Image: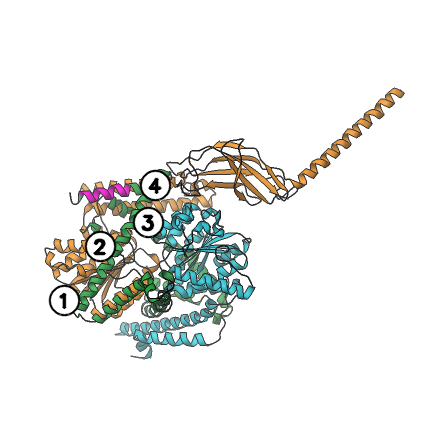
Amino acid sequence: MNIFEKLSKLDRRWVFLILAVVVIIALLVDFKTPLRINKEVQSVYDFMEALEPGDYIQMSIDYDPGTIAEMHPMTYAILEQAFKKDVKVIITALSINGPGMAEKAMLDIMDSVRILYGKELVYGEDVAFLGYKPYPGIVILSMGQNYRISFPQDYYGTPVDDLPIMKGIINYDDVKGVILITGTSGVDFWISYANGRYDVELAVGLTGVMAADYYQYLRSGQIFGLMGGMLGAAEYELLVKKPGPAMEAMKVQVWAHIVIIVFIIIGNIGYFISRRKGGVS
Amino acid sequence: MKREIPLLIVFVAGCFMAIQFFVPHASSEYVYEFVMDWTIIIGVFAMALGIWSFVKVSLNKINRRQENWQYSIVAMAGLFGMIVFGSSIMKLFGATQVGLESYMFKHFFDYVIIPLHATTFSLLAFYIASAAFRAFKAHSLMATVLLVSALIIMLRFNPFLGPVGEYVGDGAAWILNYPNMAAKRAIGIGIGLGMVATALKVILGIERGYMGSD
Amino acid sequence: MLKHIIMLVLMVGLMTAVGWAQEEGTATDSVVQQTLAAPPTNVQAFDTPNDNGHSITIEWDISADDGQGLNNVVKYLILRSATPDGQFAEIGAATPGATTFKNSGVKDDEDPNYFPRETDFYYTVSAVTADGGAESEVVGPVRGEGQFFDTRNGPVLVGCLLFTIFTIFFIRKAKSGAKLYIRPLAGIDAVDEAIGRATEMGKPILYILGLGSAADIATIASFTILGRVAKKVAEYQTSLIVPCYDPIVMTVAQETVKTGYYDAGRPDAYNEDDVFFLTNQQFAYVGGVNGIMVRQKPATNFYLGKFYAESLIMAETGSSAGAIQISGTDEVTQIPFFVVACDYTLIGEELYAASAYLGGDPTLLGTLKGQDWAKAGVIISIILGIIAAVTGQTWFTELFHVGN
């Protein structure tokens, strides 16, 4: 058994160890990954740029802590872009651990906008966080009629009608679009109910694993933009000219992919050697 | 009768929900909302059943000192700990904020639940590496096509490819937009038809697996 | 002659004066137009089609001074009144260039956003400038009425009806004794073998119903297979572990397993605690299931139902624990993960078809044939659609248009 054959039968724990070592080293080394902007990410950016001060958008932050690494950078970049442009944002969270994610993102960005741009954002006037309700399909349908059906109060217990930002805002008709950041299958409800039934302009930010599944909706026009995983988040950070954790993480992804490719090549060489030997015997 | 009544309920409810999809009238919406309210109510009661089942199984393990029974103590402590931290009982211990804003609840969420979930999810990276290593073998023409496609997708933003990177990026976009999408749509159409067929079988009472028999 | 000249001068003078006066008049008018824009024209208000009746749509042609002319329109205000000569109240605004507005609300009459159905309203649209608004003519009465059929879903209804007819036709055919061929599925054939293996090894069988709810078709299909597995497990006297993610799914699964044990004639062997609720947190569930795999080392793992990111984490752990694994899901993204980590995978609709394979009931086989014919219909439509698109026959694709 030669070295390649041995390598092709390598215990999976070695694969884990080597990958972990490479990921850690990649995190420590300074290394730039050139990015090109895909049009599905560009269209999200263009939509946000075209908004006027005082326009409304809804952001649904429907992800759980598990997917925080891919999702948070998208949320942060878009929220900051909206706040900088004085666009009013209505935030909802339709996954069980979403509220924790949404509240943290909202407060962090309100702080950073104040520090970086000197803008004092007021909760209830510039942004509202309506909170979480279970059964996303039902909630998405009800918001098409009135936000108050599912969210009579906001996350903090204030009646929605007491929030100045919600004055005259009834349903999806009153927002320019919905940006959905999610790592769950709730995205299907958004596409079939919010877009299908209420014609909502919908853009989605998804995990890398999910993204390939949703290109079909992009082609059919059911969503107008798509950010896929860390790459999508990094592209968006590049577009808003604010390098952040996603652009930083891309170097790790590049090296992790290289490790996987090397393992695949080794596995194949081992496979061909053993097949040739098998053929001779 | 034990079987006929549930089947009748399924038939009526199934037909109603199918028809409701085509009827936008307010009266149809009222009934739909009524049904949805009931779904939520049943879900809440079922959650109580679920928690009871979890507690019962865990207590049994601890009582009988089954293998690794200690883990059950940790699981129970997690369950009841979070319930207590999120409840107004904490006011007795001087907590100023309760519920989701409770100090302990928030800290356990931020510093235990978030890192644990993120860690479990990131295991995926390691498992994808080992699964790819084991499975991506060029043992046939189709497997080779799959392998090459995977390599192109992984290399699409690799900076070491220089000017070739542009072509790889275009190739990756093409793979995602055409062969990938075509295959997904084909599987999707099959799944869609399968769903309608299964729903039809359930409504007509042909498929009764969910009632506890095949 | 002089008289004629005087007459001519007087006429010219008069005409000039009239002309001046007209010019001055025009000048006066233009002063007005600089402050107020021309009102919107051709205003129409009608019941919004295909809705629940709590909405009216207003359409208009833009003001002559919107984007052209004086170009001073800053917005349009939509005003509503219950009577044509009553007090018109502002109910909404639209940006310059807009030509439509939907006046809608909710059906709950206690809600501040209530919009009454079957009530007459009158509307007018005002083109607003910095100095005031120019209102269009009043239109109405118009009332919102709910529809009993959403015409936008017509193609879906036709498709569903055709499919139902296909299916019922083949069910009847199968009942009449016609032989219907279905190709074998390795994953289904392996079920008995996998249970046998666990029995030989004296180890339990782990059955995962996925993260779906009891209403998901994949979960419903999985219940059928679980019933079969439970029956075999009872016959072979092996143990079965079913950790659940959803409490309703748990309740149904308990019933399914119990019936499986009854059918095998071993109700005494059924233990309710074998089917239990773990958690409804995705990754906590993964932790729990992986813990069971590592500690109890089941010989066979079934993953049948709805799965998301946890699919590979569970299947790889099961694979490293040396279990034989059978999986099936309709979540397209997860299928590749199951294919690489499991011994057998049921892809999408194959999972739904499992009941037909396991039960052997001819009526169930009939539904599979119905699906095949429907697929043939879809393929023919796609080919015709390509031809229509290439030849510019857009009417054909419009036949399939659903929604707005």
**Element on which disc 2 rests:** helix
Mark 1 — on which chain does it sit?
Answer: C
| Amino acid bearing label 1 | Glu
Kindly identify which residue carries mark 2: C251
Query: On the picture, is C138 further left or further right than C221?
Result: right
Q: Are marks 4 and 3 on the same chain?
A: yes
Quarter of the image for residue C316 reads bottom left
Query: On the picture, is B58 further left or further right than C122?
Result: left
B71 drawn magenta:
no
**Element on which disc 4 rests:** helix
- Closer to the camera in the image, A51 or B56: B56
Q: Nearer the viewer, mark 4 or mark 1?
A: 4
**What is the magenta range?**
B4-15
Mark 4 — on which chain does it sit?
Answer: B
Dot 3 crowding, Cα within 10 Å, few <14, some 14–19, many 20+ = some
For image coordinates 19% across by 56% down, the residue present is C254
Query: What is chain A's hue in the picture?
Result: cyan
A259, above or below C131, in the image: below
Kindly identify which residue carries mark 4: B30
Dot 1 crowding, Cα within 10 Å, few <14, some 14–19, many 20+ = few
Q: Nearer the viewer, mark 3 or mark 2?
A: 2
Query: What is chain C's hue in the picture?
Result: orange
Kindly identify which residue carries mark 3: B192
Q: Which mark is residue C200?
A: 1
Dot 2 crowding, Cα within 10 Å, few <14, some 14–19, many 20+ = many
Q: Which mark is residue A273?
A: none
| Label 1, label 3: how far apart the Cα atoms are | 39 Å
Of labels 1 and 2, earlier in sequence is 1
- Closer to the camera in the image, C291 or C391: C291
Chain letter of the green region: B
